Image (cartoon, grey):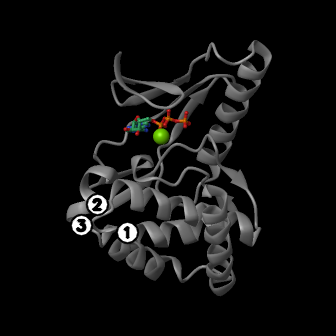
Amino acid sequence: MKLIGSGAEALIFLDGKRVIKKRIKKNYRIDELDLALRKNRTRTEAKILEKIPVDAPKLFKTDMTETLEMEFISGEKIRDVLDHNPLLAKEIGLKTSILHDAGIIHGDLTTSNMILKGEKIFFIDFGLSFFSEKIEDKAVDIHLFKQALESKHYKISDEAFKHFLNGYKLTKDYEQIIHRLKIVELRGRYKKK
Ligand SMILES: Nc1ncnc2c1ncn2[C@@H]1O[C@H](COP(=O)(O)OP(=O)(O)OP(=O)(O)O)[C@@H](O)[C@H]1O
Ligand SMILES: [Mg+2]
């Protein structure tokens, strides 16, 4: 078993074709809170992986506490390839619309949480996901993606976001979500001051 990554919260091991994602204890958090958070995120991720309507790793096993075993998606992180191929954002938009139409909010929609395998884009990292049909939650999800583009892909962010919307526009309530996105963005701006 070899360590292939350590994200914000989890250690990622590769064991053959399996990925083992283990949410480790954070010492700066009170014990009970820490366990509750890890349990919650692990269960959420398992639940979403079982129901996900877009390409995502297959879930093999979970202890429902801190560990998930899933399919290893061999490919390139979208973060590493988007600058050379901004049109990939259209497919990301389309997949996000499918997620949102299924009432799933990703919660951490960044280009580190997507993998390009062949022609397909896989979504990963569902620890912050939740079920919601609210326009506000969908708008915030998209706002996070837009911010991720602006910080990690600033050279192509405008172009990529246009492609994203082009794919996303098939979603139900598109106009309302975009209207709400503008309000979310204004709110963000006030907060910074
Ligand atoms: N199923 C998988 N197949 C291939 N690579 C993976 C897989 N799961 C995770 N990875 C790699 O490990 C990295 C970290 O995983 P992930 O994003 O799930 O953890 P994290 O950011 O710590 O998550 P969380 O916010 O839920 O704590 C990913 O960016 C990706 O490179
Ligand atoms: Mg991640």
Pick out the residue farthest to the front. 193
Q: Are marks 1 and 3 in contact (CB under 8 Å)?
A: no
Q: Amino acid at mark 3?
A: Asn
| CB of mark 3 near ligand 1 (< 8 Å) | no
What's the CA distance linking mark 2 and mark 3? 5 Å
Q: What residue is drawn where x is 39% and y is 74%?
A: 90
Q: Is residue 147 or residue 64 the one in the foreground? A: 147
Q: What residue is drawn where x is 25% and y is 56%?
A: 81
Q: Which mark is residue 59?
A: none
**Tag 2: Cα neighbours inside 10 Å, few (<14), some, or many (≥20)?**
many
**Tag 3: Cα neighbours inside 10 Å, few (<14), some, or many (≥20)?**
few
What's the CA distance linking mark 2 and mark 1? 8 Å
User: Left of 47 or right of it: where is 157?
Assistant: left
- Asked whether residue 173 appears in the rendered view, the answer is yes
Q: Amino acid at mark 1?
A: Ala
**Element under disc 1:** helix
**Element under disc 2:** helix
Residue that badge 3 annotates: 85
Q: Amino acid at mark 2?
A: Leu
Please, is residue 111 above or below residue 5 in the view?
A: below
Q: Is residue 43 or residue 185 the one in the foreground? A: 185
What's the CA distance linking mark 1 and mark 3? 8 Å
How far across and down, in percent of the image, does residue 1 sit? Answer: 35, 15
Q: Are marks 2 and 3 in contact (CB under 8 Å)?
A: yes
Q: What residue is drawn where x is 60% and y is 79%?
A: 171
Residue that badge 1 annotates: 89
Q: Are marks 2 and 1 in contact (CB under 8 Å)?
A: yes
Ligand 1 rendered quadrant: top left
Q: Which mark is residue 82?
A: 2
How far across and down, in percent of the image, does residue 92 sit? Answer: 43, 66
**Element under disc 3:** loop
